[in-house]
Image (spheres, helix red, strand yellow):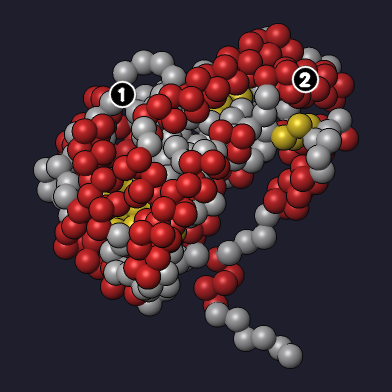
C-alpha cells in the first residue's frame, strides 16, 4: 500500500532526541529527562474512595455522555479557583474542560491557525506546544526571553516585523523548560501590547500552583481589558496526569468556538474522570495535598541546585526556579549537550538537550533538568555523573 498522507504531515518531524530518550526507560537510568510529577504523591487511596462514591451515588450519570463544555460543578470550581488565585473574573461558562492542557493547545491551533500564520513564543519554549502548533503549518518567531519573561522591546519589534501574527504563546510561571517566571510589569505590558496589536495570547499555566517560595503573581489575563488572553490549566501537576483533565478559559464567545471544534474531535472529556476530580475537590483539602507536593519538590530543587554548584564546572549559568518542575543550565559554548547526552546514557543518567526547545534554531550548550520525579540521593548521584561526563568530554 502506498499511503497518500495529508500534506500537513510534513510539518510533523520525528525527533532524534526522542529516540535517544527511549533509552532512559531502562530502570537503572537516573532520568532528569521527563516532566513527570512524583507518582508516590498521587492520592491513590482517596481516589479509590471517591471513585466508589461517584459510582454509588450517581453511576448512571457518571457513565453517560455529558456536555462538550464539561461537568458544570468542576468548571465552577476552576473559575472560582482562577479568580481567587490569578485575579481573573470567570464563571463556569468561561471554561471548557479538555484532555489535559495539551488538548487545549491543539484545539487552539484548530481554532486560530492557518498555514503560514506566525506564532510568537518565548525562546526557548515548551516542546509539545511547538509540535501542537506546527501541525497546523504555522511559523514561529522566537522572542528573546530573560529572567523576567519576554524582553518587551523585542516582543514589540517582533510584532512590527510580523504584522498579522496570530498568537503569542507563553508559560508565565516556572516555565517549561527554563523554570523562569514573568515579572508583574512584563505581564501588564504583554496584555497592553496584545491589545495594541490585536493578537491573542495563550497563557499556559500548568505549574503556577507549585510555588515553593516568593509571592503568587496575578495572571496576564487579569490585566486584559479587550479579551485577548486565553488561559490553559490542568490537574496534571496538582492531582494526577492520568485522568487527562485540563481546561481552556477565556471570553465566552471564543470558548463557544472551542466547543464547536471539540465536538468534532472527541465530543467531550471522560465523564467519570471529571466527576471523580470534582468529588475529590469537595471531600478533600486540595491545598493540603498541594502543600505536600510543594514540600517534596522544594527539597528536590534544592538538591539539584546544590549538586550543580558542587559537580558542574564553574563558568555556567543555571536557573534556580521558585517553583515548578524544571531548571535550565547553560554550559560553556564549546559543550554540545546532544553529544553529552550520549556519553551520559553510557553512565545511566539522562536530561533533555536544550536544542529541542527552540522552534527555529537552538543553543546547543543548554540542557533541561527535571527534578520532580527523582529522590534527593539519586539527584545528587545523577548530577555528579553528568558533571563527570562534562569533565571527561571537555576537560572542564
Ligand atoms: N503546557 C506545558 C508548559 C507543559 O509543560 C505541559 C506538560 N507538562 C502541558 C502544557 C500539558 O500538560 P497536560 O496535558 O498534562 O495538562
Q: Is residue 135 above or below residue 389?
A: below
The quarter of the picture where residue 136 lies is bottom left
Mark 2: secondary structure: helix
Which sits in the foreground, 339 or 154?
A: 339
Residue 7 appears in the figure: yes
Q: Position of residue 390 (x, y in %)?
A: 79, 22
Instruction: Give neighbour class at mark 1: few <14, some 14-19, many 20+ (Cα, 10 Å).
Output: some
Query: Quick check: marks 2 and 1 in contact, CB under 8 Å?
Result: no
Q: Residue at x 36, y 59 (%)?
A: 57
Q: Residue 123: which disc?
A: none
Which sits in the foreground, 244 or 146?
A: 244
- Residue 230 left/right relative to 313: left
- Residue 161 left/right relative to 308: left
Mark 1: secondary structure: loop
Q: Position of residue 349 (x, y in %)?
A: 78, 32
Count of residue discs: 2
Q: Residue furthest front?
A: 56
Instruction: Give neighbour class at mark 2: few <14, some 14-19, many 20+ (Cα, 10 Å).
Output: some
Q: Residue 216: which disc?
A: 1
Q: Position of residue 55 (x, y in %)?
A: 43, 60
Which part of the image, by quadrant, shows the C terminus?
top right
Q: Is residue 126 above or below residue 214?
A: below
2 or 1: tag closer to the N-terminus: 1
Q: Residue at x 55, y 77 (%)?
A: 7
Q: Which residue is mark 2?
A: 381
Q: Position of residue 271 (x, y in %)?
A: 39, 64
Which sits in the foreground, 291 or 17?
A: 291
- Residue 240 left/right relative to 333: left
The quarter of the picture where residue 27 lies is top right
Which part of the image, by quadrant, shows the N terminus?
bottom right
Amino acid at each position: 500500500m502506498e499511503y497518500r498522507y495529508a500534506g500537513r504531515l510534513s510539518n510533523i518531524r520525528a525527533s532524534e532526541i526522542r529516540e535517544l530518550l527511549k533509552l532512559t526507560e531502562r530502570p537503572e537510568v537516573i532520568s532528569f529527562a521527563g516532566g513527570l510529577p512524583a507518582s508516590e504523591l498521587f492520592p491513590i487511596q482517596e481516589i479509590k474512595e471517591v471513585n466508589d462514591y461517584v459510582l454509588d451515588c450517581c453511576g448512571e450519570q457518571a457513565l453517560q455522555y455529558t456536555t462538550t463544555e464539561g461537568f458544570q460543578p468542576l468548571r465552577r470550581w476552576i473559575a472560582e479557583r482562577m479568580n481567587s488565585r490569578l485575579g481573573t473574573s470567570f464563571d463556569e461558562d468561561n471554561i471548557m474542560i479538555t484532555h489535559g492542557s495539551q488538548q487545549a493547545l491543539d484545539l487552539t491551533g484548530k481554532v486560530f491557525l492557518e498555514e503560514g500564520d506566525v506564532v510568537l513564543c518565548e525562546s526557548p519554549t515548551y516542546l509539545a506546544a511547538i509540535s501542537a502548533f506546527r501541525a497546523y503549518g504555522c511559523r514561529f518567531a522566537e522572542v528573546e526571553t530573560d529572567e523576567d519573561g519576554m524582553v518587551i522591546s523585542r516582543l514589540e519589534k517582533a510584532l512590527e516585523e510580523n504584522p498579522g501574527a496570530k498568537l503569542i504563546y507563553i508559560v508565565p510561571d516556572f516555565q517549561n523548560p527554563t523554570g523562569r517566571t514573568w515579572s508583574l510589569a512584563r505581564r501588564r505590558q504583554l496584555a497592553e501590547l496584545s491589545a495594541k496589536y490585536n493578537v491573542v495570547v495563550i497563557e499556559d499555566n500548568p505549574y503556577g500552583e507549585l510555588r515553593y517560595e516568593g509571592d503568587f503573581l496575578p495572571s496576564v489575563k487579569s490585566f486584559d481589558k479587550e479579551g485577548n488572553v486565553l488561559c490553559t490549566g490542568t490537574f496534571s501537576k496538582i492531582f494526577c496526569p492520568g485522568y487527562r483533565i485540563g481546561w481552556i478559559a477565556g471570553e465566552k464567545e471564543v470558548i463557544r468556538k472551542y466547543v464547536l471544534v471539540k465536538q468534532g474531535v472527541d465530543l467531550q472529556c471522560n465523564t467519570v474522570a471529571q466527576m471523580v476530580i470534582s468529588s475529590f475537590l469537595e471531600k478533600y483539602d486540595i491545598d493540603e495535598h498541594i502543600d505536600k507536593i510543594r514540600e517534596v519538590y522544594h527539597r528536590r530543587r534544592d538538591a539539584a541546585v546544590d549538586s550543580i554548584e558542587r559537580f558542574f564546572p564553574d563558568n555556567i549559568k543555571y536557573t534556580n526556579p521558585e517553583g515548578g518542575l524544571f531548571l535550565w543550565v547553560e554550559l560553556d559554548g564549546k559543550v554540545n549537550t546532544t553529544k553529552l547526552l550520549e556519553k551520559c546514557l553510557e553512565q545511566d543518567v539522562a536530561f533533555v538537550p536544550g536544542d529541542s526547545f527552540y522552534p527555529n534554531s537552538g543553543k546547543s550548550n543548554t540542557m533541561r533538568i527535571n527534578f520532580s520525579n527523582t529522590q534527593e540521593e539519586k539527584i545528587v548521584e545523577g548530577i555528579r555523573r553528568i558533571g563527570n561526563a562534562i569533565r571527561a568530554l571537555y576537560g572542564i
